[in-house]
Image (cartoon, rainbow, N blue to C red):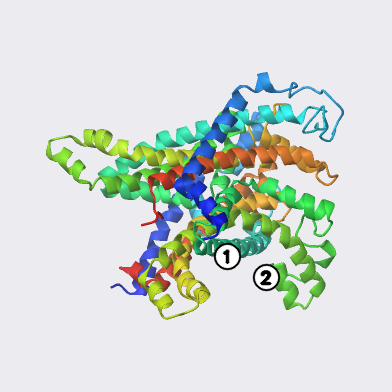
Amino acid sequence: MVSLRVYIISRLLLAIPMILILLSVVFVVLRVMPGDPVDAIVGPKAPESVKEKLRHELGLDKPLWEQYVDYLSGLLKGDMGTSLYTHRPVFEEIMDHFPATLELTICSMIVAIVVGIFTGAFGARRRNTPGDVAVRVYGIMIYAFFIPWFAMLLKLVFSVYLKWLPSGSRIEPWATPKRITGLYLIDSLLTGNIVAFVSAIRHLILPSMTLGLVLSGIFTRMTRGNLIEILRRDFITAARARGIPENRVIYGHALKNALIPIITMFGMEFALLLAGAVLTETSFAWPGIGTFLVERIAYRDYTAVQGVVVFYALLVVLVNLIVDVIYAYIDPRIRY
Amino acid sequence: MSIRRAIFSRIFRRRELEFWFTVIGGIMIIALVLMSVLAPYISPYDPTKSVGPSYCPPCEKFPLGTDKMGRDMLSRIIHGGRIALYIGIVAAFVSMAIGVPLGLISGYAGGTLDRILSLIMDSIYAFPGLVLAIIIAAMLGPNVINVIIAIAIIYVPTFFRVTRGQVLSIREEVYVEAARALGAGSSTVLLRYIFPNVIPNIAVIMSLCIADAILTEAGLTFIGLGPVVPPTPDWGYDLTVGRYVLGVGYWWIITFPGFMIFLAVLAFSLFGEGLNELLNPTLRER
């Protein structure tokens, strides 16, 4: 039996090659693959002198391995370069947009988990009834929704026809709360700004419903599958035999155990969440990292694009690390 | 048991639900492919030509309405899946052609090679696929081949992981040991004894990857990195253009192309998930 501390340290060490690999993949895609970044920035028809100058500025005239070393050592110093479009440090710009993405993804995740667990538990309880079939069909069908389409349908109903909710952006511009964390919900509460809080919630509902519901299908299926397995175990039979009400057996005894494997899946879910957030943000003009990436690709802001991708890579490794540690903490069997 | 429930279980439980998923998904796939192949013969109008007034709501003459240019939406819908399905299917095949052999070798050989390959594949797998596809498509430039490459790269790890996992378990089977004891070489064992047993699961992943690839292609189009040049009809493109008239309430422009993407993804998902349950029954009644 290895202690938790040893496990965490070895898991931390494993994160290093993963970061290196992802950073190298980014490097390969941006520099080694056919397609000249300079062409991508100024267009293939630009005069050769302009291209040369830019190539020199970006250090693209150096040998490949030297570029690679420069790139890695720059990142090690926390330097993501300066935006070609705004001439601001890329890291600063990313941090401007990150809270919006964080707020959206957290809210979407809450929607996905709540909806997923309830539908999944509902199906598992009523195994092989029409209700269960509906849950299974839901689990597959909801994932087939193309996020921008789903977003447009919700917008059509709730903001164009019913006019209940705003169709885009994060908040009414005049209601923006003072920036503390960058998360509007928290900032508006901290400053006691109820108007901002309401506005932020109203703007959050449609985007987090869109992303949350599309991702909920996976949780539905996992919860249903795990719960059915757990309900077959002896301790459930024992609990039922002791006369504990069925609701408490399911929600108190079984569900808790069914949720542990779901935590392990969260690392992979996170990639889906980030990818989904790009489309959700673009659909709702939500000023997060996804919108930032798409906008800078259109402006051919090469350094900003590279910075965003590196940021995603670090985020993914960090989240996977946290998930593994939490899982090891909850389930001691994992640490041998 | 109530009568309703009895009737219900007679219809559905005789054949397990996953059987119906597979059949319905399969029929939908065939229907979509037929529609795309036969598009020029069955669509009422030329999808690239203006045949009516601009933004005409669905009516008798144009059952799904017309778009900005007065083109018939029904004809565009019928033609619109050709590129999406083509890209989805070809990209998934390319991923398979790279991921499966790597998975076979990695799983069978083990050791350092396996560890390095697995680490690389796991890292890419953990990265949001659409973002990777976006930067690859942005660097290569948007056209059909480049979009196929971008999408194919992001699904290689999926095939790799599934194949490798399968090889690891099949490798320990008695018949593989028997083959080896009889003097079969590594390549014979791998190709004649292990590979055939991996194929069913590859079919599952294939179907699910096509579903995902169609979504990714539509996503790239939505972001402006799509392979489609107007006036070529494409579900993703028509949907993307439709968002600009959403506020005016022209619902038919977005509803139908999006619904077709939904149907196509659903078809391949149902087929893949159903097949998976039939092949690997994890939750059958014991």
Do we see residue B262 in this rendering? Answer: yes
x, y (%) of residue B125?
A: 46, 49
Q: Amino acid at mark 2?
A: Thr
Report the residue marked by disc 2.
A181
Do we see residue A79 in this rendering? Answer: no
Q: Is residue A295 above or below residue A183?
A: above
Report the residue marked by disc 1.
A118
x, y (%) of residue B113?
A: 30, 45
Give the mark, 2 or 1, whose residue is nearer the N terminus: 1
Tell which tag, 2 or 1, sits nearer the viewer. 1
Horizontal side of residue A185 vs A195, given as left or right: left
As drawn, the residue found furthest toward the left would be B182
Q: Is residue A191 above or below residue B82?
A: below
Residue A158, picture quadrant? bottom right
The residue tagged with tag 2: helix, strand or loop? loop
Q: Is residue A77 above or below residue B74?
A: below
Q: CA distance from mark 2 to mark 1?
A: 32 Å
User: Which quadrant is home to the N terminus of chain A?
Assistant: bottom left
x, y (%) of residue B33?
A: 57, 28
